[in-house]
Amino acid sequence: ALRAAAPGDVVLAPRNATYYVTGGIAASNLYNVTLRIDANLCLDADIAAWPLVDEPRSANGTARHAPWLLVQNASRFAVTGVGAVDGRGRRWWDAAITGSVPHLGENRPDMLVINASTDVLVGDGLSLRNSPHFHLHFYSCHRVVVRHMDIDVDRFAQRRIKARAHAERLTRAGLLNSSAAFDLTSRLYGLVA
């Protein structure tokens, strides 16, 4: 549904539901689209079932696991909602630490990757939990706002690998948790009339 979204569309995962999903969801060239997650999404913890992507290859030359969601070349794109995405990362963390899956370390999937996009909003009540790797990864983006969201990690289970958001080549990015910023950024993204 996200790949087919037209300008002004809201793709909705509705409340009071739990969905089990695998990674490899990719969408590009979206304009003025909102992905609203009000449900609980549980990512597949089966490492063998997770899709691989050939490019970009990791530093050790092995294929990487695809992110759960990859959005590229989007403008005025938002990921919001009052739901949660649970990466169910414990199996991934354990395999990376013990070496039971060769070359897994940095090849674990990121949860949400946004690449080469402008005017991006993430948050507004959304929760991200226990990503196998990075929860958020922004690359070559301009005007990104992350606000009013929770990123949680079961630190005991994760042991020595830290939860983090990763940003490369960002311009005019902001991490906001203030209601004063809401009106300005809501108009910017067309979320409020």
Image: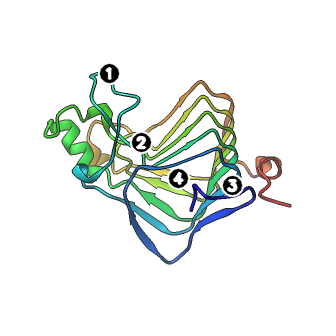
Q: Name the residue under label 3.
A: 33
Give residue 10's mark.
Answer: none
Under circle 4, the secondary element is: strand
Residue corresponding to mark 4: 150
Estimate the spatial distance between the alpha carbons at disc 3 and disc 4, rounded to whole Å. 22 Å
Q: Is mark 3 on a helix, strand or loop?
A: strand
Near mark 3 (Cα within 10 A), the count class, few <14, some 14-19 or many ≥20, is many
User: Within the image, what quadrant is residue 159 found in?
Assistant: top left
Q: Report the residue marked by disc 2.
A: 110
Q: Earlier in the sequence, mark 2 or mark 3?
A: 3
Please, is residue 149 above or below residue 20 in the view?
above
- Decide: is 172 above or below 43: above
Question: Cβ–Cβ below 8 Å for labels 1 and 4?
Answer: no
Please tell me whether mark 3 or mark 4 is closer to you in this view: 3
Quarter of the picture holding the C terminus: bottom right
Q: Looking at this view, name the residue that lies furthest to the front.
A: 4
Mark 4 residue crowding within 10 angstroms, few (<14) / some (14–19) / many (20+): some
Quadrant of the snapshot with the N terminus? bottom right
What amino acid type is highlighted by mark number 3?
A: Val
Viewer-closest of 162 and 7:
7
Q: Earlier in the sequence, mark 2 or mark 4?
A: 2
| Mark 2–mark 3 CB contact (< 8 Å) | no
- Residue 111 horizontal side relative to residue 9, left or right: left
Q: Distance between the residues labelled 3 and 1?
A: 34 Å
Coordinates of residue 31 in the picture (x, y in percent): 71, 48
Which comes before the other along the chain, label 3 or label 4? Answer: 3
Amino acid type for the residue under numbered disc 2: Asp
